[in-house]
Image: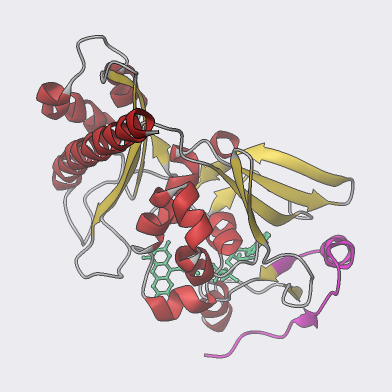
Amino acid sequence: MKPSRFEYVLPRSIEEAVAARVEHADTVVLSGGQSLVPTLNFRLSNPEAVIDLRLVPGLDDVRVEGEWIHVGGRTRQRDLELDDAVHAANPLIRETLHHVAHPVIRNRGTVGGSIAHADPSAELPCLLLCLDGEVVAHGPSGARTIDAQDLFEFILSTTLEPDEILTEVRFPVLPERTGWCFTEFARRHGDFALAGVAATLTLADDGTIAWGQLAACGVTTTPVRLVAVEDALLDDAADPSRFREIAALAADVVTVPDDESCSSAYRRDLLVGLVERALRTSWQRATERATARTSREVTS
Ligand SMILES: Cc1cc2nc3c(=O)[nH]c(=O)nc-3n(C[C@H](O)[C@H](O)[C@H](O)COP(=O)(O)OP(=O)(O)OC[C@H]3O[C@@H](n4cnc5c(N)ncnc54)[C@H](O)[C@@H]3O)c2cc1C
């Protein structure tokens, strides 16, 4: 099918892009087009205007600065995945991007596009939520920062206003003594996952677990933090021998009903298994990092 008629707007600055958002009653933003173009072609979306961001300068800048990794909203997913400075600052980002669709899609799909699209099964919103990341949105009254925990509202719905444009995504640098893992299960590699989990685990100086951060995708109407699991990890007695029991606390977040892919009960079991795997991998990596750091300190 072909899309219904729309006005095509090609702004050359973020101010022009926002002005176009304000001028037209119903607009969409064209970033990588990997989700938008099919919805236009199937006429699931019939906007008055399509605002193409490709000539807006600065939207694909990536830089690691202090404790934050700044990623321009229109940065291609593949460029972020291949960025070695980003990988050194936070290896969970590359591991997560590896699960997003196929390289061909990631060549065009953008980081901001995926987050603004807010598919509950998508990996990048889940990553952002797990890491306590944030986004910057530009609107008619300027820029504002939105924490990941305040961003995702419902299926394909965020707290971005209709006249705002997401211009930057910020991920924190991974702290010392911290391990990481992104794991998911999809019927075929590159398909949207039935469930996925992003995790980090930080060790105290004595090697015990200090805290963990976990989020899941594909299990409810938004990406979701696994708060019960995180709370259990704060217990003094939390150690790898209890990971299976702790992972079981994730099951209650699943609200997706039985569908053509699997039953809700299967998805709950799957999530618990993925959380246990994510905890074990994160713990092992955190231990290796802490050991490598200690030997560096001893030899210097
Ligand atoms: C075959 C296939 C398989 C896929 N598999 C996966 C997968 O496994 N996991 C996954 O996460 N994704 C998957 N995707 C989606 C892909 O990652 C898309 O790239 C992503 O969802 C949207 O990014 P985009 O840059 O293409 O955004 P677009 O398609 O350009 O835009 C998507 C939506 O976000 C809005 N938007 C875009 N940018 C902005 C902005 N800066 N400010 C405000 N609103 C904005 C648009 O208005 C639109 O509504 C798949 C896509 C395809 C075609």
Residue 241 to residue 168: above or below? above
Does residue 35 appear to the left or right of 300 in the view shown? right
**Farthest residue toward the top?**
236
Residue 105, x across and y down, in percent: 44, 77
Q: Assign the C terminus to one quadrant of the image.
A: top left
Does residue 163 appear to the left or right of 122 in the view shown? right
- Depth check: 203 or 188 in front? 203
Quadrant in the picture for residue 293: top left
Magenta-drawn stretch contains 4: yes
Please state the extent of the stretch shown in magenta in the rendering: 1-28
Magenta-drawn stretch contains 6: yes
- Depth check: 117 or 44 in front? 117
Residue 26 appearing in the image = yes
Does residue 210 appear to the left or right of 240 in the view shown? right
Q: Residue at x 83, y 66 (%)?
A: 17
Residue 262, x across and y down, in percent: 17, 55
Q: Residue at x 35, y 35 (%)?
A: 296
Which of the colour schemes (rainbow, by chain, secondary structure, one colour) is used? secondary structure
Quadrant in the picture for residue 190: bottom left
